[in-house]
Amino acid sequence: MTTRSFIVGGAGFIGSHLVDRLVARGPVTVYDNLSVGKRAFIADHLAAGRATLVEADALDLERLTREIKGHDVVFHLAANPEARWGLERTRLDLEQGTIAMYNVLEAMRLAGVPRLIFSSSGTVYGDTAERCAEGDLGKLPISLYGASKLAGEALISAFSSCFGLHATIFRFGNVVGPRGTHGAALDFLRKLRDKQTYLEVLGDGLQAKPYLFVTDCTEGLVFGLDHGKGPLDIWNLAPPDETSVARIAALCVEASPHKNAEIRFTGGDRGWPGDVPRSKMSPERLALHGYVVRYSSDEAVDLAVKALAGEVFPGTEAA
Ligand SMILES: NC(=O)c1ccc[n+]([C@@H]2O[C@H](COP(=O)([O-])OP(=O)(O)OC[C@H]3O[C@@H](n4cnc5c(N)ncnc54)[C@H](O)[C@@H]3O)[C@@H](O)[C@H]2O)c1
């Protein structure tokens, strides 16, 4: 059976990998303002006519409603890409997170599209080093980014209950892989490209989080489409283990052409206010439904660092 998919933020990192997967099921519409995403990430699918790009903003409700009409499922992936940007622009997550989420839901309601998959995040669990399952919301988010994700989840619940929307919410760990647009590994590799003798790492390096390889992420999203019973499913999507920032830094130095670069930690237990230094997520609920990720956190980071090093240092033997 053909699925007509609509991906808000589909030209970005995770979105473009999702397009790779969804084109086998039917036509894909990518709705993206290209603020971070790139046409090049989906160029082959556009050229082959498997996907269409609508270059527009999720904050434009009228356009969104017009374009969303006629699709079977919406994947909402657009958001502020960097949690720490909220420290300088405090409206950013309200607009790009909460209001964009409202617009997607309202456009779906007006256009009669019944099915939503949303990319939330483990940041909803707040500052806790305890392993969190989906019900563990005793601590609230500590970043404006995390707050907007939790607000988005609440809006989905309300639309689902009031208007019959069938929704699946995924709370991702940190997603890594080729075409990454942000995150620690990419930051470190870019720093090494710009300053070859040392790598400055924010915090003490002991921060540790679950890292999810991007193909495990997109396979999980499609699993959600096929197996979400509704009306509202909430699933963690992360490996059961964690990787430290110090390990990522060491792998980046090793994968770069600057193997003698010294790693300098700025100190302190976290990179910036709002950053959760140590987090653990339980993947058990999703496993009980039948989906288990392929790569551990350490394996995901190894693969991603190699791929990103090849992108940051093209033509060298970095990767
Ligand atoms: N990458 C991670 O580690 C991670 C972890 C947890 C959750 N998430 C969530 O997954 C989603 C995808 O993340 P990603 O890493 O692919 O980020 P990304 O920045 O690469 O992709 C987001 C895409 O949305 C587009 N976009 C942003 N604002 C828009 C707007 N107002 N209108 C239209 N398009 C807009 C961008 O151009 C980009 O192509 C985000 O919602 C993010 O919060 C990501």
Image (tube, grey):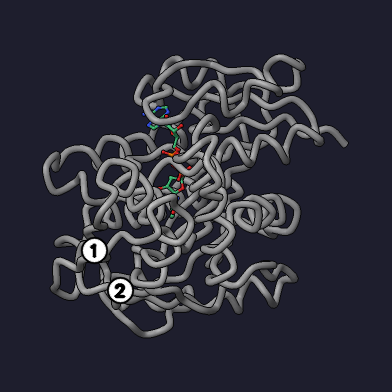
Q: From mark 1 to mark 2, how far is it between C-alphas? A: 10 Å
Q: Residue at x 14, y 43 (%)?
A: 90
Residue at left 32%, top 49%? 192
| Nearer to the camera, 228 or 275 | 275
Up-down relation of residue 286 to residue 272 (above or below): below
Instruction: Give, as a three-letter code, the residue at label 2.
Output: Gln
Indicate the secondary structure of the residue bearing disc 1: loop
- Mark drawn on residue 28: none
Q: Is residue 306 above or below residue 21?
A: below
Q: Position of residue 137 (x, y in %)?
A: 35, 74
Q: Which residue does the numbered mark 2 point to in the structure image?
A: 207
Mark 2 is surrounded, within 10 Å at the Cα level, by few (under 14), some (14 to 19) or many (20 or more) other residues, namely many
Q: Are marks 1 and 2 in contact (CB under 8 Å)?
A: yes
Q: Foreground residue, 299 or 130?
A: 299
Quadrant where the N terminus is found in the figure: top right
Q: How many marks?
A: 2
Image quarter for ligand 1 equals top left
Amino acid type, mark 1: Asp
Q: Secondary structure at mark 2?
A: loop
Residue 125: name its quadrant: bottom left
Residue closer to the observer: 257 or 100 = 257
Q: Residue furthest bottom?
A: 130
Percent position of residue 161, x then y: 50, 52
- Name the side, left or right, on which 83 lies relative to 3: left
Name of the residue lying farthest toward the front: 260
Q: Quadrant of residue 249?
A: bottom left
Numbered mark located on residue 275 in the image: 1
